[in-house]
Amino acid sequence: MATETMDILLVEDNPGDARLIQEMLKEGRLAGSEVDVVERLDAALRRAGERRFGAIILDLNLPDSTGLDTLDRIVAATGGMIPVIILTGLNDEVMGESSINRGADDYLVKGDVTLSQLARSLRYAVERKRMARELAEREERYRALVEHQGDAVCRWLPDTTLTYVNGAYCALTGVSREHAAGRRWIDFVPAEDREAVLSFYCDLPDGLDVYTFEHRVMTPSGVNRWIFWSDVPIRSVNGNIVEFQSVGRDITERKEAEDLLTSNFTLLRIAGETAKFGGWRVDIASGIIFWSDEVAAIHEMPSGYCPSVNEGIDFYAPEWRDMITRIFTDCAVKGIPYDEEMEIITAKGNRVWVRTIGEAVRDTNGKIIQVQGSFQDITERKRIEEKTMAQLEELRRWHEAMLDREERVIELKREVNDLLKRLGEPARYRSVEE
């Protein structure tokens, strides 16, 4: 069996346990490894600073430190670059999981661990650290490739401290590479946006390989630019995010176009609500009607409701269904447009007068693929028309009853002319005296 040797720092205050571990390490594949034993954490920190060890075997409970604080101080002193194996007498799954999450490479329990388990744990931990160092070297080579990339590229720690920026990032923010190192990129975000940006990065969902976000960045000229970021998390061997690499693309023109579109849509929505006017579209292939929010409101249905053609026709009052079926079919099949006034019965049972307009939409080959149009609630207009007609009819009856009374006739003629004037219609009587 091939032997493997490494310098091991054993931090153990129990002489009996320390001797047992040393004896175990003299056997098997780790025979020949040099083991340096210390009993206190402060001594371990000094040794780790004086000499580069291949691995550290650590008891959490020492005379000068206990619990996870012992691990935290070792990991901080070594920069997380030296494998740390916890070997303790406490068989605690929660403690073991916490140890792994805070930088330990394995959690073993005294009395349960065997030579093969200890050796395997050390080998695997060393290999993981080696791979981590190789990854860091590959990232450094990759960094050279992105240095002259047109998009902004940066590396940063979870607290937003920048560790690397390329030239495009410097051009965007106006910060030189020398001054960028150690600065927090959140400082380049407008003050009013920072809380929302930080909130996004504090609540990242687990398990994703790429996170995307867009926010504004202040440029040297004082103009804010919108940047779309693709953030790739860089994780430790334990899965913890230790750094991000981000690529940013300027999307200011797109955002300005979206804002203009949203503004126009808002104006159209307000106009539609005021006029009780909306649009609709039928996809011929699926037979589904797509209603605007206002069309749905006219039918007293929720926004987003998309009925079938037959369901849409069923909203029309019974006396109008044959007509709407005929004119819609002619439009969908023959391309004949229509503009009609009919009555529907809403989902709540209310009768509503509507004006419905439809026209065919063809593809590049001339095939009708859609029917689209507008839809307007004209109930109020109809009520006014009916009321006006009733008043005119009443005046007509009075007119006929008063033909033999000249003065009353003249008065009625004036009333008729005044009423027609208010309606925007021409006067019926050119001279009330005749």
Image (cartoon, helix red, strand yellow):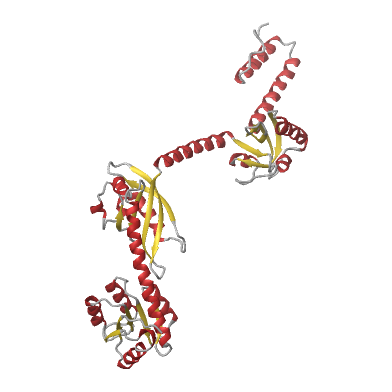
Q: Is residue 146 visible?
A: yes
Compare residues 310 and 408 and report the one nearer the observer: 310
Q: Find residue 119 and report its image quarter.
A: bottom left
Task: Classify residue 374 by image quadrant.
Answer: top right
- Residue 33, position in %: x, y? 31, 84
Q: Say which quarter of the image contains residue 122.
A: bottom left
Answer with left or right where residue 140 lies relative to residue 403.
Answer: left
Q: Between 190 and 33, which is closer to the camera in this rendering?
A: 33
Residue at 34%, 76% in the rendered image: 83
On screen, residue 64 versus residue 29, left or right, reads: left
The residue lying furthest to the bottom in this view is: 16
Task: Please name the residue shown 66% across and 10% down the image.
Answer: 429
Q: Position of residue 234 (x, y in %)?
A: 38, 62
Count of labels shown? 0
Of the 4 image quadrants, the one containing the N terminus is bottom left
Image quarter of the C terminus:
top right
Instruction: List the single residue furthest toward the front.
Output: 1
- The residue depicted at 77 percent of the width and 38 percent of the height is 318
Residue 25 in the image: above or below residue 142:
below
Whole-percent x, y for residue 323 in the image = 76, 32
- Near-viewer residue (429 or 59): 59
Position of 299 with respect to 133 (left or right) is: right
Viewer can see residue 156 = no
Q: Is residue 233 above or below residue 409?
A: below
* Residue at x-position 23% and y-position 80%: 47
Q: Is residue 182 above or below residue 100?
A: above
Where is residue 113 drawn, in percent x and y?
42, 87
